[in-house]
Image (cartoon, grey):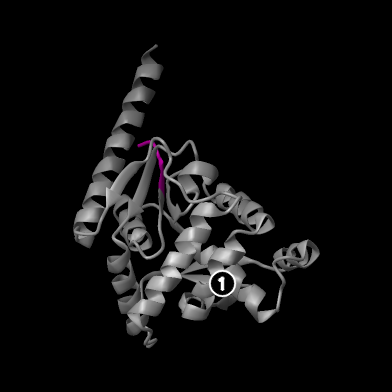
Amino acid sequence: MPKIIVAIDGYSSCGKSTTAKLVAKQLNYPYIDTGAMYRAVTLYFIQNHISGTNPKEVENALAQIQISFRRHPELGRNDTYLNGLNVEDEIRKMYVSEKVSDVSAIAEVRHALVAQQQRMGRARGIVMDGRDIGTVVFPQAELKIFMTADPLIRAQRRQQELMEKGELIGLAEIAENLKMRDHIDTHRAESPLRQAADAVYIDNSLMTLDEQVELVVRLADARITSSLRSREINRTK
């Protein structure tokens, strides 16, 4: 069977990562969480007091950063490793969320991570989510999804996620953080968040997780079938 690239873009806390993980599982594809990569860089910048306005500091810092993903055998999830250390829980904390959009807007950071993401997808057969996957990283992806949800619902989902990890943050603070991140993500000069012209738009405000996953898998199966038919037609020519 031909392998395709599934690119899922969207706003913060709209559920795209959760959906992408489950879609990857059903397709038996690797899942790449690009948001985690930017969070890991942000964590490194915070811990090492890197100034995003100093190009030399940024360049030197990026040369010291190695990001990888490893399967957690007990929790059944892919954990993010920064220079050999598991930072999966740390990068999800609010103090990282408050800085990640600023760090992600730095051109040198985006260039470095986009190049790494493109290397990951050379063999195809992956599900990758982020904010510029269908527009910059893989504009040739067979299936592009642009996902969103009502801002209040996104804030509630984010609050629930933080509560499950022991962080008690007020809904108003979370909503303001998401509003700020949306503005930075959509207005930055380097790879702003936008819907690709050929992306399927999904507002999941009133959808269950199962419904989201089922829809994306169905779309992916259709693209795989189409690729298979095209391959067979070319073979008979």
Say which quadrant the N terminus sits in.
top left
Q: Which x, y percent locates residue 100?
A: 55, 68
**Please, which residue is most extreme toward the right here?**
56
Q: Please name the amino acid that badge 1 sits on.
A: Lys
Q: Nearer the viewer, residue 86 or 58?
A: 58
As drawn, 184 above or below 231: below
Q: How many marks?
A: 1
Q: Which x, y percent locates residue 54?
A: 77, 66
Describe the element under mark 1 as helix, strand or loop: helix
Q: Residue at x 49, y 42 (%)?
A: 135
Task: Give the residue at mark 1.
Answer: 99
As drawn, 95 above or below 217: below
Q: Which x, y percent locates residue 6?
A: 39, 46
Q: Please say whether residue 122 is visible from this viewpoint.
A: no
Q: Which x, y percent locates residue 92?
A: 46, 75
Residues shaded magenta? 1-7
Q: Residue at x 31, y 45 (%)?
A: 201
As drawn, 120 above or below 67: above
Q: Nearer the viewer, residue 33 or 49?
A: 49
